């Protein structure tokens, strides 16, 4: 998929994510593309994970759900931090420093996770922001932080 093709479908993916949130929670959750929606996004992902664990959806459906929910998560990250979409086989969020992480792949891993070790969308967001801040620090600032660890 080329970046222009993805960008032309992005709004449709986000709308599908919002609809999926309503469907999986019987209308109790309406997802949005703002930071306050991360906990609700995690609840929807948990519902989809439960469907997958019960074998009510297969890998293909899980991937398609990951694309729409991952696009929503990516938009939250971009909106909050001024990053942008790029393509690295699949759509990824890229920082000014050219660091890339894939919210789509992360959500897919969470949905397919049988051992409950993959974390959450909120944890992914927090980790992404911490990593981005680290890479924007001077070598001196990085040294101070790593000495404390």
Image (cartoon, grey):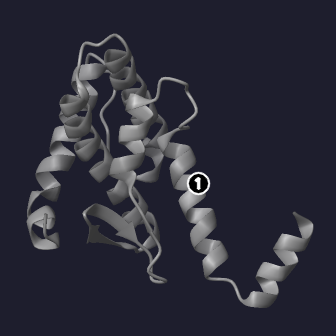
Above/below status of 89 relative to 61? below
- Which residue shows up at 16% across the image and 40% down it? 16
Viewer-closest of 57 and 94: 57
Can residue 73 be seen at all in this image of the molecule?
Answer: no
In the rendered image, the quadrant that contains the C terminus is bottom right
Quadrant of residue 137 in the image?
A: bottom right
In the rendered image, the quadrant that contains the N terminus is bottom left
- Which residue shows up at 49% across the image and 83% down it? 97
| Left or right of 76 in this view: 147 | right
Can residue 119 be seen at all in this image of the molecule?
Answer: yes
| Left or right of 64 in this view: 111 | right
Describe the element under mark 1 as helix, strand or loop: helix
Q: How many numbered dots are placed on residues in this image?
A: 1
Residue 44 in percent (x, y) is at 37, 29
Above/below status of 144 relative to 45? below
| Left or right of 143 in this view: 56 | left
Residue 122 in percent (x, y) is at 52, 45
Residue 82 in percent (x, y) is at 41, 74
Residue topped by disc 1: 126
Above/below status of 29 relative to 72? above
- Which residue shows up at 62% across the image and 78% down it? 135
Quadrant of residue 57 in the image?
A: top left
Is the residue marked by circle 1 packed among few (<14), some (14-19), or many (20+) residues within 10 Å?
A: few
Residue 60 in percent (x, y) is at 19, 32
């Amino acid at each position: 998929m080329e970046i222009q093709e993805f960008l032309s479908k992005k709004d449709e993916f986000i709308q599908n994510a919002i609809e999926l949130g309503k469907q999986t929670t019987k209308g109790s959750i309406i997802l949005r593309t703002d930071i306050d929606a991360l906990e609700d996004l995690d609840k929807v992902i948990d519902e989809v994970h439960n469907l997958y664990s019960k074998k009510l959806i297969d890998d293909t459906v899980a991937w398609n759900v990951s694309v729409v929910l991952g696009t929503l998560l990516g938009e939250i990250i971009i909106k909050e931090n001024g990053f942008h979409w790029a393509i690295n086989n699949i759509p990824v969020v890229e920082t000014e420093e050219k660091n890339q992480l894939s919210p789509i792949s992360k959500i897919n891993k969470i949905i397919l996770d049988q051992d409950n070790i993959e974390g959450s969308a909120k944890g992914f967001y927090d980790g992404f922001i911490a990593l981005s801040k680290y890479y924007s620090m001077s070598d001196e600032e990085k040294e101070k932080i790593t000495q404390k660890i």
